[in-house]
Image (cartoon, rainbow, N blue to C red):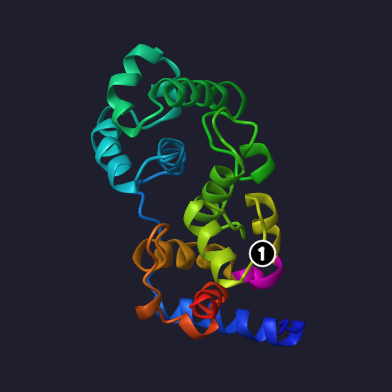
Amino acid sequence: MREGKTRKRTRQAEILQRLEENYPDAKPALEYSTVFELLVSVILSAQCTDVRVNAVTEELFKHYNKPEHFAVLKQEELLPMIKSCGLGPSKAKNIIATAKLLVEKYEGKVPSDIETLQTLPGVGRKTANVVASVGFGTPAIAVDTHVFRVANRTGLANAKDVKNTEEQLMQVIPKDKWALAHHWLIWHGRRVCSARKPSCDSCSLFDVCSYAKEQAIAK
């Protein structure tokens, strides 16, 4: 039986309410003290765990924590310090290039505008949204692998790519909760709705989740 628009909206609202209740203290896992440190951390987090990034930046930021510091580094100097995050050469290149651009064009300050952020080397839509929402309080939804998976499994979205998932979530989630919902979905993805083996039996969204319903029908 096809789900009507009103029923779908009601179910999506219930999902969001439960996520908010389950993760009232949800916040970024990356550790940073400035927006620039946040930017570097998010760049390093591509295909890497936040735990690993935090271990790397804990030492890295003791020596280099401003655009001016990174702008004068050579790639071979930065690479040994970040290589354990994976994709070392490209990340080192992008961080240095971004630092130089910030110094030369933005007086060493990270721009707050999402579109402008995306002009920085190594900064895609997801990274820009994270920096804008977490660093500047701008309403934005960053769609990483966890957000993409949980949003589409539960039925908050029904998209095959990140861009459409972001657009659909922006329609479903109240604007003042975009940034918060990003963290709710990440935490749920990490703690319950894992990629390979989601814990559906113990999930608080079980009765309102599209994926759980499909699995029940399949049985």
State whether residue 147 is above or below residue 85.
Answer: below
Q: Is residue 185 left or right of residue 63?
A: right
Residue extending farthest right: 5
Residue at coordinates 45% horizontally, 19% vertically from top-left? 71
Q: Residue at x 61, y 84 (%)?
A: 11
Can you tell which quarter of the image residue 148 is in?
Answer: bottom right
* Residue 152, x across and y down, in percent: 59, 64
Please give left or right for residue 175 compared with residue 185 in the image. right
Q: In this picture, is 219 found above or below 100?
A: below
Q: In the displayed structure, does residue 68 sit left or right of residue 14?
A: left
Residue placed at 43% from the left, 43% from the top? 38
Task: Name the residue nearer the viewer: 194 or 116.
Answer: 194
Q: Secondary structure at mark 1?
A: loop
Q: Position of residue 130 (x, y in %)?
A: 52, 50
Q: Is residue 99 magenta?
A: no
Residue that numbered label 1 is attached to = 158
Total count of labels = 1
Q: Which residues are magenta?
A: 171-176
Identify the image quadrant of the N terminus.
bottom right
Name which quarter of the figure residue 179 lies in: bottom right
Q: Which is nearer the eye, 198 or 161?
A: 198
Q: Position of residue 105 (x, y in %)?
A: 62, 25
Q: Can you say whether 201 is above or below 42 in the image?
A: below
Q: Main secondary structure of the magenta part?
A: helix
Q: Residue furthest front?
A: 219
Question: Label 1 neighbourhood size at 10 Å, few (<14), some (14-19), many (20+)?
Answer: some
Q: Amino acid at mark 1?
A: Asn
> Residue 174 colored magenta?
yes
Q: Position of residue 115 (x, y in %)?
A: 69, 41
